[in-house]
Image (cartoon, helix red, strand yellow):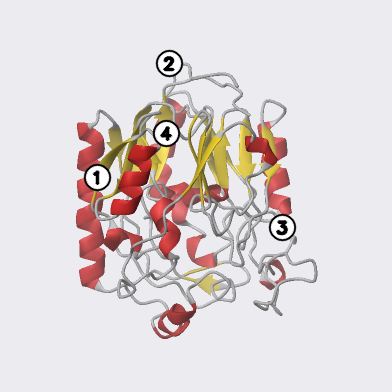
């Protein structure tokens, strides 16, 4: 394992790991957050008790009081980051309920709350992801002013193949039953490459990936070829019947330290042999708290500021204690209302620049 390097980065975009010292970050917004139009890509990943809500509220705004509560928490989060010495950038609001059409379908948007889904930073390359949800087709436009600024400052700016997202991209006979080999039945087909950035986690030269209901083999292979031989992409399988995004399943926190979901990772992958691996404590989010698009394991969706400091939900006392026991310094922030919208601190951010160099840790 090659250790951490504090070499300063020269360009506006540079990030190789989830733990190098954070210098600049994009924090999402919930302006105009809206339920997406109903589509077959939704049932495989929504909590069962939310299906009818999403059907009946399709295309309408999320409850105003919940949006406002989440907005306040985002402001608190941004304030904490600035106080810790991090430059905070924000996307531009988009009119999410404006309808748009391609040659094959019509939709409207959802939000620009989760930059971790739409954009992937690997080194000095910031990549727009070919996302699988029609409601997120134009989501990256909220970040365009920043992308242009970073490019003009010397960053590379790439984009995956813009998907058609025709019906052929989605299994029209999707069922919750697992496949004969026991693997989850995924709704995305291999018709064209799609992936969300949140299905990848970065450990220097090694990038951990999972197939999911938004990320297919075709998308992973496109990224592998795009990044070239400097990087190694490892596709891992987990005990997750509804996979979508890896950052509440497997969280590398520092060189040699890994947090895992005890339900989804019953056996530590051989790739992390020799690492100190800890199971995340069970979530304590109350049953009454609404979670539109995620499980309670969103409590694992923490953000590392460096190899010591970590942002964690203020009310999640078991996680706070677990992180202290693991040798980290928790920084507390209220975020439960934001959790309702499908993410936490890692989802809500894109680490644009971390101080470090490309190393091998696995």
The circle on residue 192 is 3
The residue positioned 21% from the left and 49% from the top of the image is 75
Q: Is residue 28 visible?
A: no
Q: Earlier in the sequence, mark 4 or mark 1?
A: 1
Decide: marks 3, 1 in contact (CB < 8 A)?
no
* Residue 163, percent from left and from top: 64, 57
**How far is mark 3 from mark 1, CA to CA?**
41 Å
The residue carrying mark 1 is 332
In this image, 37 relative to 26: left or right? right
**How far is mark 2 from mark 4, CA to CA?**
16 Å
The residue carrying mark 4 is 352
Q: Earlier in the sequence, mark 4 or mark 3?
A: 3
Q: Earlier in the sequence, mark 3 or mark 1?
A: 3
The image shows residue 299, relative to residue 34, as above or below, that is above
The residue positioned 61% from the left and 23% from the top of the image is 360
SS at mark 3?
loop
The residue carrying mark 2 is 6
Residue 208 lies in what quarter of the image? top right
Mark 3 or 1, closer to the camera: 1
The image shows residue 189, relative to residue 360, as above or below, that is below
**How far is mark 4 from mark 1, CA to CA?**
22 Å
Specify few, some or many for label 2: CA neighbours under 10 Å numbering under 14, 14-19, or 20 or more. Answer: few
Decide: marks 2, 4 in contact (CB < 8 A)?
no
Q: Earlier in the sequence, mark 2 or mark 4?
A: 2
SS at mark 4?
strand
Residue 272 lies in what quarter of the image? top right
* Residue 235, percent from left and from top: 69, 46
Specify few, some or many for label 4: CA neighbours under 10 Å numbering under 14, 14-19, or 20 or more. Answer: many
Q: Is residue 149 visible?
A: yes
Mark 4 or 3, closer to the camera: 4
SS at mark 2?
loop
**How far is mark 4 from mark 3, CA to CA?**
28 Å
């Amino acid at each position: 394992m090659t250790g951490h390097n504090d070499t300063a980065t020269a360009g506006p975009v540079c990030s190789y790991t989830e733990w190098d010292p954070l210098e600049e970050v994009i924090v999402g917004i919930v302006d105009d957050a809206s339920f997406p139009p109903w589509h077959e890509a939704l049932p495989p990943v929504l909590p069962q008790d939310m299906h009818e809500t999403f059907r009946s509220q399709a295309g309408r705004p999320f409850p105003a009081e919940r949006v406002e509560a989440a907005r306040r928490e985002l402001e608190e989060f941004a304030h904490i980051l600035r106080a810790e010495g991090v430059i905070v950038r924000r996307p531009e609001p988009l009119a999410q309920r404006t309808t748009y059409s391609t040659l094959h379908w019509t939709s409207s948007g959802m939000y620009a709350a989760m930059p971790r889904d739409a954009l992937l930073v690997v080194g000095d390359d910031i990549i727009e992801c070919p996302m699988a949800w029609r409601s997120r087709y134009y989501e990256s436009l909220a970040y365009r002013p920043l992308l242009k600024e970073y490019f003009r400052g010397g960053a590379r700016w790439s984009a995956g193949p813009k998907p058609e997202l025709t019906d052929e991209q989605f299994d029209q006979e999707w069922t919750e039953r697992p496949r004969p080999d026991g693997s989850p039945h995924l709704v995305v087909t291999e018709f064209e490459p799609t992936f969300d950035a949140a299905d990848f986690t970065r450990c220097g030269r090694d990038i951990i990936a999972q197939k999911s209901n938004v990320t297919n083999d075709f998308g992973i292979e496109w990224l592998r070829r795009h990044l070239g031989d400097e990087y190694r992409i490892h596709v891992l399988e987990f005990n997750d019947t509804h996979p979508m995004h890896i950052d509440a399943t497997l969280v590398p926190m520092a060189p040699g330290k890994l947090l895992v979901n005890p339900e989804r990772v019953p056996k530590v992958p051989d790739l992390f042999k020799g690492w100190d691996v800890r199971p995340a404590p069970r979530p304590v989010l109350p049953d009454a708290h609404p979670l539109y698009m995620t499980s309670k394991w969103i409590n694992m969706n923490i953000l590392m500021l460096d190899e010591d400091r970590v942002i964690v939900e203020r009310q999640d006392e078991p996680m706070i204690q677990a992180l202290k026991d693991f040798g980290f310094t928790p920084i507390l922030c209220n975020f439960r209302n934001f959790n309702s919208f499908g993410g936490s601190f890692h989802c809500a951010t894109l680490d644009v620049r971390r101080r470090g160099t490309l190393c091998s840790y696995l």
